[in-house]
Structures are given as C-alpha cells and as structure tokens.
Amino acid sequence: MKAMSDDKPVRVYTSCFASIVGTENAVCWEDIPLSQQKSILQAIASLSPPGCIVYPHTTEQLAAVMTAAHRNKWRVLPCGSGSKLNWGGLVKDVDVVVSTERLNRLIEHAVGDLTITAEAGMKFSRLQEMLADSRQFLAIDPMTQDKATLGGIVATADTGSLRQRYGSVRDQLLGITFVRADGQIAKAGGRVVKNVAGYDLMKLFTGSYGTLGVISQVTFRVYPMQEISGTVVLTGDAKAVSQSAGVLRGSALTPTQADLLSTQLVSSLGLPQGLGLIARFQSIVESVKEQSNRLLEVGEQLGLKGTIYSAADEADLWRILREQMHSSGNESAIICKIGVLPTSAVEVLTQADMGWIHIASGLGVLQFEGDNGIDKVLGMRNLCQTNGGFLTILEAPVKLKQQLDVWGYTGNAVELMRLIKEQFDKEYILSPGRFVGGI
C-alpha cells in the first residue's frame, strides 16, 4: 500500500473521500482495473502510484473533495474518462486522481438559442446523440470521439479540422463552472451566445490541462446539421498539392474541414500515392455538388488525382483517417501537436512519417515511430520553429518524456503563467508539473 509523507497508509485517502462520495466512489489503487492503472501510470513521473481514484457525482461533492485535498495538501490529478490523461508533461507525486466521469448529466438544451449545458464528465459521443434528435451538433472533432469527455476536451483544447468553418474550442465555449484548488465553486460566462460580462475565464481554462481548477460544467454554442456532406481528396506531387491548398485558401469555396495529409497517411488510406489534400463540404445538395466539382477541376489542372466521397464511404474515410493517426496500437509511438505557417505545411509533411495539417491555421498532428523517434521529434521541432511554429509532444513513452521538454516552449510568458497558476492554485496541488515550464 502506498504510504503518505507522514507514514499513514492509503486507507486514510479512501476513508476521507468515502465519507464524501461513498465507499463505492473512492477506489483504492489496488482495486483499480489494470487497464486504468496503466493509463494513470503513463501520466505520472513517479514510480509510486496515487493512493486512490475518487468519483464525485455532483459539483458539490467535487468541491468537498477538493476542500479535503487542499486541507491535507494532497496533490490531485483531475481527469474525465482518462483518454487524454497521458497528454502533456508528466505529473509529479500524485496522491489522488479525481475523475469527473460520473458528473455526466445534461443540464439544459436551449434548442432555439443553439446552446447546450452539460456536466464535464458527459461523453462527447453521448452529447452528439442528444443533439442529433434536434438536428443539431457540437462542431468539435476530438481525437477519441467515443471516449472523450466535455471537460477533457476543454482542458486539452482538443479541436480538430472542423476549426476550418467553426473555429476552436475557445470559440465555442460560452460558459464554465469549475472548482478551485481550495474547493470553492466558481462560474464564468453564461448560457447565451452574446454573454460578454466578466473576465474571460473560458479562454484561460481551455488548454490549461487541469492545472487551474477542475471543470464541472460547460456551456457550448451548437449548430444546425447540414442537409448533405461530401468530401474531395486530391493526391499527387507535393508542389501541386501545395498549390491546390493555396487556391482553396484564396477561393470563395467554404469547406467545413480542410487538411493536408502526409504521403504515408495517404497510403494508409488506400489512396493514390503522393501528398494529399482532403476537403469536406456540407450544405444543401446543389452547393456541395458545385463546390466539390470546382475543387476537382483545380486538382485536374494541377495534375492531381481526385476522388469524391459521400454517404457511408465518406464517414468511413474520416473515421479511418482519425484511427490511423491516433490508434496506432504501438506503445512506442510518439504523437505530437504542431503549428506552423500554413504556407510551410507541405514542407513539414514531406519530412514527416504520419501527419495532417489544417490548411488555414497550420495546426496539425504528427506521429513518429521507431528507435530513432527522439531524433525525428527534435529534428521536426527545429523545422517547425524555423517556420515560425512549435511542436508539443502529446503522447510518448514515459522514458522519452523524462528525457525531453515535451512542450518545447521558447516564448517569454512562463513567468506570467506561473503568476496565474499561483492565483488559482497557490499550493500547486493540481496536476503539478503537467503544464509548460513544469507548472
């Protein structure tokens, strides 16, 4: 059993939290399923596991849990379902894992106002099912759509290529409720699209990786479903693909998703060889057909091979694309988030193994494998920084994360980040070491 600094056994943790959430919701380490233990161990720097995992069912229970942790100065690793628990830096000396997975109720769906409020532990896939009943959807496409929770998506800023039309998580988050490190409940924003009162804590908490507070409830703007969808894929010579992306960026075409794909990723999809450009159009039938044909014509003029996907074939294409990038099954795989100037995206992808980059923002994901993964990552980080960008390691073996600065941040805002951290968590008990600069 894990011992605390004062040599009290792990049952002190569980008995303390069981009095708040019930015995069945305060699970000691030995009773946690092995798969979940493995996920947690991939997120921490120490060989010593946390004492227990706690599952609050209400915001009030979560507040009481954090009050107890703060009083005892126990270090807390917040999570949802744990699908992105191993993102970011390794957390130092975790005492307790606090999961919001059972905080998963729908609070309000204002159909006419196009907003929805739900607890942080609700699965993204479940929310989309609920919205579909009203012909609406949340315009975010996280990496693991079946496992991701709403709180986890916000905490890690886990957007995808839907940002082409709808923007990032920050752009769609209207309100947030969170529990501070000292157990106090705080709220920001509201449940209406035009709410602008108060300091914008929504943007501050998006991408904070559980270091400022534990998110318990979120409000998003949602959108009406489109009538029909179609996807165009162009593949071929890197220069021609780059030109096609430039034409698309400067045209009147309005794709909802548009990305550049590496040669290896194109090949894994069973498409013709070369780099790829994938663009999805969603609107009325006539618009989707016209825009798809116009992009195909651009590809033909540049000597690229083009294909249009629709219905089930289109859904399978995007599903396989996501699986190829994020479900390699290889424990040695290194998954990185990058950002470069959009005009440099093709240059980066020609030197990457598996990867895609959003054509408008220059944000993307790369995957590396093999024994020389560290050298590849460092080389790619240098290339990204040379092109005005960055490379952050999301997922990697623990040993590799212990050797590298996973964030690779070279800016001058670390001291400001520390000051913000101390305003929210003076004792540094929330996810210590997970964020930039070891915050």
Image (tube, helix red, strand yellow):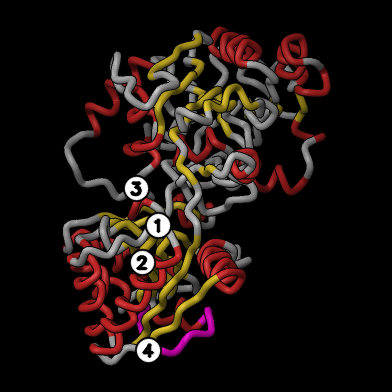
Tell me the residue that label 4 is attached to: 305
- The mark that comes first in sequence, 2 or 1, is 1
Q: Secondary structure at mark 4?
A: strand
- The mark that comes first in sequence, 4 or 1, is 1
- The mark that comes first in sequence, 4 or 2, is 2
Q: In the rendering, which numbered label is found on residue 407?
A: 3
On the image, the x and y values in percent for residue 355 come to: 41, 69
**Residue 63 in sight here:** yes
| Local crowd size for mark 3, using a 10 Å CA cut-off: few (<14), some (14–19), many (≥20) | many
- Looking at the rendered structure, the kind of residue marked 3 is Trp
Q: Which residues are magenta?
A: 268-276
Main SS of residues in magenta: loop
- The mark that comes first in sequence, 3 or 2, is 2
**Residue 41 in sight here:** no
* Residue drawn where x is 57% and y is 29% of the image: 120
On the image, the x and y values in percent for residue 248 come to: 24, 69
Q: CA distance from mark 4 to mark 1?
A: 22 Å
Q: CA distance from mark 4 to mark 3?
A: 38 Å
**Mark 2–mark 1 CB contact (< 8 Å):** yes
Tell me the residue that label 2 is attached to: 259
Q: CA distance from mark 1 to mark 3?
A: 22 Å
Name the residue at the bottom extreme: 303
Q: In terms of image quadrants, where is residue 351?
A: bottom left
Q: In the rendering, which numbered label is found on residue 161?
A: 1
The reply, left or right, for residue 43 in relation to residue 249 is right
- The mark that comes first in sequence, 4 or 3, is 4
